[in-house]
Amino acid sequence: MIKVENLSKNYKLDNGEEISALKNINLEVKDGEILGIIGMSGSGKTSLLRILRGVEKFDEGKIKLDNIEVSSDSSQYYYNKLRKDTAIHLQRSFGLWPETALNNVVRKLYGAKYGDEASTDFDFAYDQFGDEAMEILKVVGLEDKSEHFAPVLSGGEKQRLIMARQLAKKPKVLLLDEPATMACPRTKQAILDSIKRINSDLGVTVVLVSHLPEVHTYLADRVILLEDGEIKEEGDASDVTKEFLSDIEPEIEIDLTVDDKSIIKANNIEKKFFLLKGGSVLDIEDINLEIKKRDILTILGPSGAGKSIILRILAGLDYPEKGEVLYRLEHEELDNIDNDSIKNSKNNENDSKEDIEDIWVDLDDPGINRMKVRRKIGFMYQEFALQHHSTIRDQLATKLGFKNQFVVDDARKKAKELGLGDELLDSLYQLTDLPENEAKSRLEQIGLLPDILDDLFPKFPEKAVREEIKPLFEALDLPLEILNRKSYELSGGQKVRAMLALALASKPETLLLDEPFGDLDPLTLRIVSNSIKKINKEFKSTIVMVSHNIDFIKELSKRAVFMDKGKIIDDGDPIRLANEFVTSCKADYLS
């Protein structure tokens, strides 16, 4: 069905550098086959998938899909024909309409027939496409979510909805790039079973990129291993994945030391979420957490349990309807000892004499003390995004400017010159932890220009970034050459590690990670895992993370809490909780 002959692809970067992504690739995909592609970050997997999709041109060779033939010198007409017969789900792609799941599929069916899904006449569209849309939702296991709005779906549900939208195009070939990256074992099983049904029930040929050996073993008829843009191995999934894992870095031992001193307290947290139609969708209640310095705590549980919401509340990016989040601030950093927002630890009779010298700051109370707490927090989002137009060096300079040890005092002086009070300054500082677009939107709502953040929190000198960041890049196995590249010039794995570098650049005392490593291959994940262990030990940092990667949880966590339906169900040994979770999920792909 698909035949690739002598395919080569080079990328020319903005700085003139040229990278060879694919070298003389030859492969065939049979009609109705599931072909798996595995390899390290940067090996060329996504490039090959995009070329098969017809959205990426290549330098040498040719592609045949049934009666379509595309060569390196073919016109756009032939690339468009390739696009018509294929559909793709890209890595970490969440391009969905802010409407119901059913609307999203109806729109795509309408667009596939009439050419413009944006101008859908829904009365007409439901009559013509409603039943078909429901059938597609059944194939991906989302029929019970048909009236749920896309923005409130869990990460795994969004991924299945994206697949449903692609199926609405009735493709001959479905190209999947890490389709189950951020899903829990239960949801991942549902996604993988959906892919099986797409292949068997609809007869769609599937080309699947995944870094997870167990996914290929469960799904793929055949697997190819890409290494540095070349096919290194091809054959049975178990044999090829074994070869792939043979070069994995040894695991370093974790330092299990945890201080007696608590640095974060979440007390009686409650927050409710509702659908416009359908009532309550998630009730978060009775969340009580005490996190000690130097701990590595994982919050695990099924997709949609409320884990990411709790992490955002711990970061002060969202606020609970009831309850409080308190951070310990050392006494010498205190701005105003009489501030009502400070809860003195003398009120806790269990605190030691040393603890009494510290104070607790409520993240719901604005002011300079909260700024000082925020300066020490690093956060990495589940749906992270590097800035498209800026180099990695520029983004690091910005982040180092936001989080350096003098930023609070320097910003306060500047704010006084501009006539801004402490509470407004603190509110503006909060925006520096948000994605750029969200920060700009909030500034516009209060009539301020984005330049105000640059004035208050100037960048770290760009010339000094390289030396400042060099040890961290070495720990993350990132080449310093990417400092001058933009996000679209990085591989998927490089983007994840670059984003982690942004979160770690200022050496935060508390690091909050929301499923940041779902799309890293096992070899790169081991490098990152070992790096985090070193950072935790060397800088005595405290890490709270949400993850669905069971092996990663067991390897990296010192403690775990299990959440389901908005509540903490269990708290204790991460290996025990992870094993119990896998058993409850009935995740056949892990057996």
Image: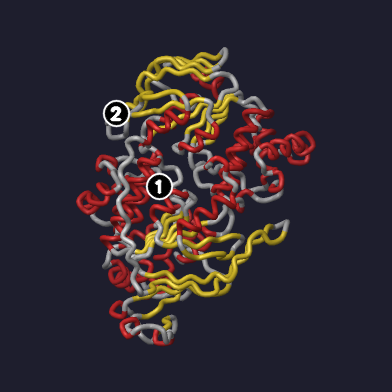
Q: Determine the CA span between mark 1 and mark 2.
A: 22 Å
**Front in this rendered view, residue 389 or 282:** 282
Amino acid at dot 1? Leu
Mark sitting earlier along the chain (1/2): 2
Q: Residues within 10 Å of mark 1 (few under 14, many from 20)?
A: some
Residue 462 showing in the rendered view: no
x, y percentage for residue 467? 20, 51
The residue that mark 1 highlights is: 386
Residue 261: mark in rendering: none
Amino acid at dot 2? Glu
**Front in this rendered view, residue 53 or 187:** 187
Q: Residue at x 35, y 74 (%)?
A: 260
The residue that mark 2 highlights is: 18
x, y percentage for residue 545? 44, 58
Left or right: residue 110 versus residue 351 is right
Q: Residue at x 33, y 74 (%)?
A: 416
- Quadrant for the N terminus, please: top right
x, y percentage for residue 548? 49, 50
Disc tally is 2
Q: Is residue 415 above or below residue 110?
A: below
Left or right: residue 532 versus residue 117 is left
x, y percentage for residue 417? 32, 72
Check disc 2 and report its element: helix, strand or loop.
strand
